[in-house]
Amino acid sequence: MHNPTMLKSFIAFMDSIKNEEFPWLVTGSFRMFLEGSQQISPRDIDIVTNMEGCKIIEKRFADRITHSIKRRHSGSLDSVFGCLQISGVRYDIMAQVFNKIDGKWINIPNCDRTEYILKAGARIPVLPLDEELRLAQLLNDKFKIDALKKLMNAAP
């Protein structure tokens, strides 16, 4: 996916929910793109919120939902999950995300820690890079660990 197209789609998403009050943040590869990562090219936009946020997003984007937002379980991941599409860009909407690590369910990522970055004139809520790194380490995602470390070392 061409990143300027994703950014334009994301700004449209933000504009559509700007008057709503619920916690949400961007995580994953698009979050890293927003920070300037050159190593990872996002294919979708991951949004983490709570149950209220899921309901608001599902209602606001009812005509763009491609997978209904509901509880899903697959091996080492248990979450409320659904998808929508805006301008050809896929959005994964998640809440109550639990990853099974060493036999224990860990609630990460979540909205407990949120940072804000400025991009394209917008104040964007994101999962802090150290939380992204912690999740990548827990999941043993070596490529993402390397990309995050490079990104964090390049930060001023």
Image (cartoon, rainbow, N blue to C red):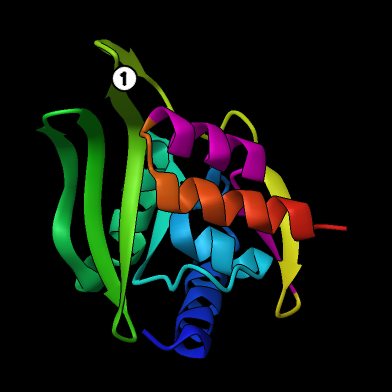
Compared with 89, 54 (above or below) is above
Q: How many marks?
A: 1
Q: Is residue 21 magenta?
A: no
Write down the quadrant of residue 90 in the picture.
bottom left
Percent x, y for residue 109? 46, 35
Measured along the vertical axis of the image, is residue 83 above or below residue 129?
Answer: below
Residue 23 in picture, x, y percent from top left: 55, 41
Q: Quadrant of residue 120?
A: bottom right
The magenta-colored residue range is 122-138
- Residue 87, position in %: x, y? 34, 86
Q: Is residue 82 visible?
A: yes
- In this orientation, does residue 109 appear? no
Which quadrant would the N terminus be assigned to in this image?
bottom left
Specify few, some or many for label 1: CA neighbours under 10 Å numbering under 14, 14-19, or 20 or more. Answer: few
Q: Name the one closer to the observer, 107 or 66.
A: 107
Residue 39 shown left or right of residue 150 in the figure = left
Residue at (49, 65) in percent of width and height: 30
**Is residue 136 rendered magenta in the image?**
yes
Q: Which residue is mark 1?
A: 101
Q: Residue at x 42, y 28 (%)?
A: 138
What's the residue at 46%, 89% (across, down)?
A: 5
